[in-house]
Image: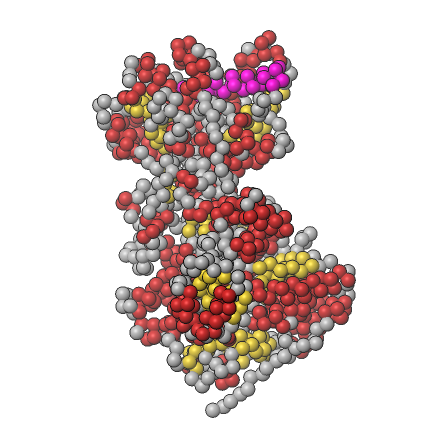
């Protein structure tokens, strides 16, 4: 933004803002909030909902404050009679094409349109009801996302999200005039198009048009069934996001309260995905070193490098559709959620003396794609569906409220055992670059016998919010068995947000960039910005969540995956060794190409 | 390679792979095949590296870029005010009777589709209709039927 | 009754008044700033309907620094009641080409495009043939400028200039936020001078004749003449080039069928003038501006049907992106239907008029903003016909 300052008046109060600012930004500076709907800080400006219209002296028409740049000497009025009439009309018009069954809506209480309607005291419907009966048929084809056209107000945030942030383009605007709608290719169901289930559209939908498929009732039923043993795992990013839906500011760590709440709700065992995140590092790190050995020592040309991570199910579906030729690059490791699921109904069942058919495996995830992942046919290694139900952070917050738990007053509790132990390395899985950092902490130490040469284990080059980040680590002083890596410059890259992943993988595919290891997270910011996290989201909020994650890491006594005692234990008691026979059967998988076109 | 694939590739060769070529490419497909089949849209999306939904969304914005099958001859009768005043209704009724289809439908033999259109720009000479790209101003019910009969005699 | 004749003009369609070779070889020697001064001096305003001073538009585009600039001829004539551009492109296309070339020379563009509405595809063959000759002439004159045609595909909104750019860029024809204006960021987000077909012909003729002859026509606010598309209940429907600034009464005397009850000035998005206002209505920028559409209704016509037609048109042709237009058009259309059927009381029309007023100020582009013109003028003047 320009250094040049522009002077204007808003509601007769002078303000100076940098040239290129919008009226909304200038008004914010004066603490005037101008309502917006189609505007979202992560997306390009659309200026189509018109709820933010303001009056500018001398202009015949009102201006969209989200899109209109300030000008020297401009006089803006945000609440004049003309503005109020127009704004109220816009809200009434939106309501006339919106199926306002608020009390039955999943977004009841979390709907931006509802808030505006309440704020403007929109009373009896002035205008005719335009909701089409055909729009009331829900698309519930996807196990992750539910689309309800009758609630859609055509702000196009979802379309911009899908295209600008995710480069997926599953959603588009079709037709025009009274037929205009947000839809998929040829109006197919979401399950049958290139949707990655990432849920970023849900995070930005102002109404209940796009929400997660929710499984709260099913989970409650199992909890209340005395014959079922219900285990729950919680992903790293849940503990730093959940508080936002329960009255806390972004950046609050609520790990102990999260565990308490789950116990109060009645889960039989409250466990941690961090355990299998650490396990993932063992498996994936070994896989990487094995690939490097095959490539460098054995000169095996069938080995595919760079290897990419496989934790993010949105990323997996994206690569299946978009870069099927690069599927061999993807680590064969299942995601931590699925490793956990496979072990819950085998290892855990054995240790606890439970019949796996009576175990219900629930996971709390910052993610909607995990719902799809749990339903993949590949994910039944235990002989059962490895993970039965996936709830988002938001669904858990609702269950906590339903249970009447005063969350902020809960005492902190510890995860149960076994499979409840996690390290700092596992926690940072929740932030972009975290898997990379965790992997490097372990791999470097395996190879050299020394800790990674970064202050306090913080591998800062792979941290941050740049879309694509690169780092190089030179390996020196290797142990004898890893001497082939002596002097090797390990080149790694990290991408988050699929638009960045696409850019990175295009370079890899076209051999314009060479790396050894790549971490990709489908969502902006990584899992902390996942499609199942509390709404709203913004760069600022994601930054605060990231800080919380790194603080959690620093506060933990163990910060390297290979030092997790439960991980050491499971290899001793059950798995044998990383990439061993049992690991292979339970913890690894392969994916198949899907069509993009 | 299918006929549609060949067509799309030829059009893309002619107009280029940039997004700016989307309209001419889609128009070229419609000119040959009368509508944009799923296959055609997917092929265009692949060739221009645009999402399939975006191609569909863009095409469906434009009245002449049909995404449902159309007959060899697409009849569009102007329905806007001046043609309305000049008697477009009797023209449409006559064509509908003759072809035994309603507006929006295609004859069983796939030869004709009957549609209405917004202002075609012949308000001084209404009613007017287009048959594919050919224009027929100042028609009557009888004249319209004769014109369509003429097309029916073509291959 | 006093009977005036209105002044017919013959600039646009006059044959043999434009020899492209002669005119261009002379013009391309001139200082571009002088050409702009002539256009400004002539008082020429855009003939598409919005009426922005053409000379200023060229000047602004010329002042932009950019490697790429474009001249675009807006031939997406879709306003119901307007058909002049088709006639111009059919009869005197060279005059349009010359205007584009002069504009290209003035602003420093190498590429020109004619965005021709898909409904006029039958003109393509002959236009392309003539363009080939013209582009060859440009080469011969060593002027680096090339014109090509892009077709529309049936979307009224693409006549809105920023929607037209979007369409040319292969996207849905959804109007953009303004600013930036086309002179700064138009096609491909480069400086673009976009002019209506008729405007370009006038620039050609002003370049040829000088500004004086043009300026002598019309009034202070509405210089020159204009091509009118006359249709509806008139025995002499067609295209007429007339001096601007005439009272509507004079127009009706010349063109009406003796039973005229209303004239829709400016097409579906224009104003409906009832008989009692004919005397006081001036056709021009000081009165009711028009892109040239004059549709005459006699007493046999139901103004409810007229308004219903217009609203149906806008409901279908709205791009659909902004709330006031997408939903507003549907509400106005269904609203008058509800009143007609007695499902809403007549005073619901007052609510609808307020809504139309909101559309006028809150819609994103000219389409949505102008729906209030026909709505309010018809409802105000023919309220009984709407209700009963």
**Above/below status of A350 relative to A176:** above
**Residue A76 covered by magenta stretch:** no
Front one among B38 and A232: B38
Front one among A358 and B97: B97
Residue A410 position within the rendered picture, expressed as x and y whole percent measured from the top left: 30, 26
Query: What's the magenta region?
Result: A272-300
- At 63% from the left and 79% from the top, the residue drawn is C10
How many numbered discs sit on the rendered protein? Answer: 0
- At 29% from the left and 48% from the top, the residue drawn is A101
**Above/below status of A74 relative to A405:** below
- At 61% from the left and 64% from the top, the residue drawn is C124
Give left or right: position of A474 versus C258.
right
- At 55% from the left and 31% from the top, the residue drawn is A325
Residue A200 visible to the viewer = no
**Above/below status of B86 relative to A102:** below
- Residue A470, by quadrant, is top right
Residue C294 position within the rendered picture, expressed as x and y whole percent measured from the top left: 50, 75
Residue A290 visible to the viewer = yes
Give left or right: position of A184 versus A134.
right
Helix, strand or loop for the magenta stretch, by majority: helix
Q: Residue furthest top?
A: A480
Front one among C274 and A115: C274
**Above/below status of A293 relative to A194:** above
Which quadrant does the N terminus of chain A fall into?
top right
Residue B12 position within the rendered picture, expressed as x and y whole percent measured from the top left: 60, 48
Q: What kind of colouring is applied to the model shown? A: secondary structure
Residue A40 position within the rendered picture, expressed as x and y whole percent measured from the top left: 46, 44
């Amino acid at each position: 933004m320009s250094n040049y300052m522009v002077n204007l008046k808003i509601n007769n109060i002078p303000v100076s803002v940098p040239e290129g600012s919008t009226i909304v930004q200038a008004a914010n500076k004066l603490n005037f909030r101008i309502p917006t709907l189609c505007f979202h800080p992560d997306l390009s400006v659309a200026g189509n909902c018109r709820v933010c219209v303001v009056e500018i002296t001398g202009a015949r028409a009102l201006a969209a404050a989200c899109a209109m740049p300030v000008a020297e000497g401009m006089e803006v009025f945000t609440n004049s009679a003309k503005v109020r009439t127009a704004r109220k009309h816009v809200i009434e018009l939106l309501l006339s094409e919106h199926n306002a069954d608020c009390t039955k809506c999943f977004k009841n209480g979390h709907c931006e349109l509802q808030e505006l309607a309440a704020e403007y005291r929109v009373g009896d419907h002035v205008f005719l009801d335009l909701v089409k009966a055909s729009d009331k048929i829900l698309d519930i084809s996807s196990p992750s996302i539910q689309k309800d056209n009758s609630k859609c107000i055509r702000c196009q945030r979802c379309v911009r999200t899908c295209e600008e942030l995710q480069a997926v383009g599953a959603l588009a605007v079709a037709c025009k005039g009274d037929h205009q709608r947000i839809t998929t290719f040829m109006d197919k169901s979401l399950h049958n198009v290139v949707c990655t289930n990432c849920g970023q559209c849900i995070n930005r939908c102002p109404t209940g048009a796009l929400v997660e498929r929710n499984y709260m009732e099913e989970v409650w039923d199992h909890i209340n069934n005395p014959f079922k043993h219900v285990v729950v795992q919680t992903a790293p990013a849940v503990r730093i996001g959940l508080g936002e839906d329960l009255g806390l500011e972004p950046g609050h760590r609520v790990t102990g309260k999260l565990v308490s709440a789950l116990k109060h709700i009645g889960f039989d065992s409250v466990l941690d995905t961090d355990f299998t995140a650490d396990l993932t590092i063992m498996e994936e790190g070994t896989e990487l070193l094995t690939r490097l050995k095959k490539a460098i020592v054995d000169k095996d040309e069938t080995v595919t490098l760079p290897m990419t991570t496989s934790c993010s199910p949105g990323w997996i579906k994206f690569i299946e559709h978009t870069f099927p030729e690069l599927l061999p690059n993807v680590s064969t490791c299942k995601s931590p959620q699925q490793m956990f699921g496979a072990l819950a109904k085998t290892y855990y069942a054995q240790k606890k003396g439970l019949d796996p058919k009576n175990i219900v495996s629930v996971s709390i995830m910052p993610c909607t794609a995990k719902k799809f992942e749990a339903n993949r046919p590949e994910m039944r290694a235990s002989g059962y569906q490895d993970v039965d139900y996936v709830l988002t952070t938001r669904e858990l917050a609702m269950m906590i409220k339903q249970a009447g738990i005063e969350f902020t007053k809960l005492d902190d509790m510890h995860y149960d055992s076994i499979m409840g132990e996690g390290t700092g390395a596992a926690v940072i899985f929740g932030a972009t670059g975290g898997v990379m950092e965790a992997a490097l902490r372990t791999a470097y130490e395996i190879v050299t016998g020394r800790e990674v040469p970064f202050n306090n284990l913080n591998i800062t080059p792979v941290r941050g919010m740049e879309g694509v980040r690169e780092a190089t680590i030179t390996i020196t002083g290797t142990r004898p068995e890893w001497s082939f890596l002596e002097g090797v410059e390990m080149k790694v890259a990290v991408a988050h947000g699929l638009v960045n992943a696409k850019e990175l993988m295009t370079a890899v595919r076209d051999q314009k960039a060479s790396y050894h290891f790549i971490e990709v997270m489908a969502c902006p910011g990584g899992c902390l910005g996942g499609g199942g996290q509390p709404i709203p989201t913004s760069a600022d909020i994601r930054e605060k969540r990231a800080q919380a994650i790194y603080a959690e890491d620093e506060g933990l006594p163990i910060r390297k995956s290979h030092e997790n005692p439960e991980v050491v234990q499971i290899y001793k008691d059950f798995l044998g060794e990383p990439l061993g026979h049992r690991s292979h059967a339970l913890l690894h998988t392969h994916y198949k190409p899907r069509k993009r076109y | 390679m299918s006929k549609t694939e060949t067509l799309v590739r030829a059009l893309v060769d002619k107009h280029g792979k940039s997004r700016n070529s989307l309209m001419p490419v889609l128009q070229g497909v419609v000119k040959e095949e009368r509508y944009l089949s799923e296959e055609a849209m997917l092929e265009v999306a692949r060739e221009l590296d645009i999402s399939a939904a975006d191609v569909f969304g863009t095409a469906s914005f434009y009245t002449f870029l049909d995404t449902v099958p159309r007959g060899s001859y697409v009849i569009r009768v102007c329905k806007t005010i001046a043609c309305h005043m000049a008697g477009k209704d009797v023209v449409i009724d006559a064509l509908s009777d003759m072809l035994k289809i309603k507006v929006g439908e295609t004859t069983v033999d796939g030869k004709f589709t009957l549609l209405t259109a917004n202002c075609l720009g012949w308000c001084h000479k209404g009613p007017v209709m287009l048959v594919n790209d050919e224009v027929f101003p100042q028609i009557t019910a009888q004249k319209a039927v004769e014109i369509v009969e003429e097309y029916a005699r073509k291959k | 009754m006093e009977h005036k004749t209105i002044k017919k003009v013959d600039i646009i369609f006059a044959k043999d008044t434009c020899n492209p070779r002669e005119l261009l070889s002379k013009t391309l020697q001139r200082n571009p700033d002088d050409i702009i001064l002539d256009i400004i001096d002539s008082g020429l305003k855009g003939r598409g309907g919005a009426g922005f001073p053409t000379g200023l538009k060229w000047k602004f585009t010329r002042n932009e620094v950019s490697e790429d600039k474009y001249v675009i001829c807006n031939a997406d004539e879709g306003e119901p009641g307007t058909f002049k551009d088709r006639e111009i492109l059919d009869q005197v296309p060279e005059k349009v080409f010359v205007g584009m070339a002069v504009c290209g020379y003035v602003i420093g563009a190498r590429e020109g495009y004619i965005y021709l509405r898909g409904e006029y595809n039958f003109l393509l063959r002959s236009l392309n043939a003539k363009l080939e000759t013209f582009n060859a002439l440009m080469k011969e004159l060593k002027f680096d400028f090339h014109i090509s045609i892009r077709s529309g595909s049936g979307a009224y909104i693409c006549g809105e200039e920023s929607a037209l750019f979007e369409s040319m860029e292969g996207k849905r024809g959804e109007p953009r936020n303004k600013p930036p204006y086309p002179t700064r960021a138009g096609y491909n987000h480069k400086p673009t001078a976009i002019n209506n077909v008729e405007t370009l012909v006038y620039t050609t003729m002003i370049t040829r004749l000088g500004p004086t002859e043009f300026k002598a026509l019309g009034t202070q606010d509405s210089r020159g003449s204009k091509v009118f598309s006359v249709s509806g209940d008139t025995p002499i429907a067609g295209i007429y080039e007339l001096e601007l600034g005439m009272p509507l009464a004079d127009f009706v005397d010349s063109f009406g069928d003796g039973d005229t009850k209303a004239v829709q000035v400016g097409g579906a998005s224009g104003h409906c003038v009832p008989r009692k206002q004919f005397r006081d209505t001036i056709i021009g920028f000081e009165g009711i501006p028009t892109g040239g559409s004059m549709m005459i209704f006699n007493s046999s016509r139901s103004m409810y049907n007229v308004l219903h037609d217009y609203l149906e048109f806008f409901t279908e042709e709205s791009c659909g992106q902004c709330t006031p237009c997408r939903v507003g058009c549907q509400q106005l259309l269904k609203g008058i239907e509800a009143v007609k059927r007695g499902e809403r009381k007549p005073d619901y029309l007052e609510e609808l008029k307020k809504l139309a007023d909101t559309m006028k100020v809150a819609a994103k582009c000219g389409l949505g903003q102008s729906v209030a013109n026909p709505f309010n003028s018809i409802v105000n003047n023919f309220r009984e016909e709407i209700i009963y």
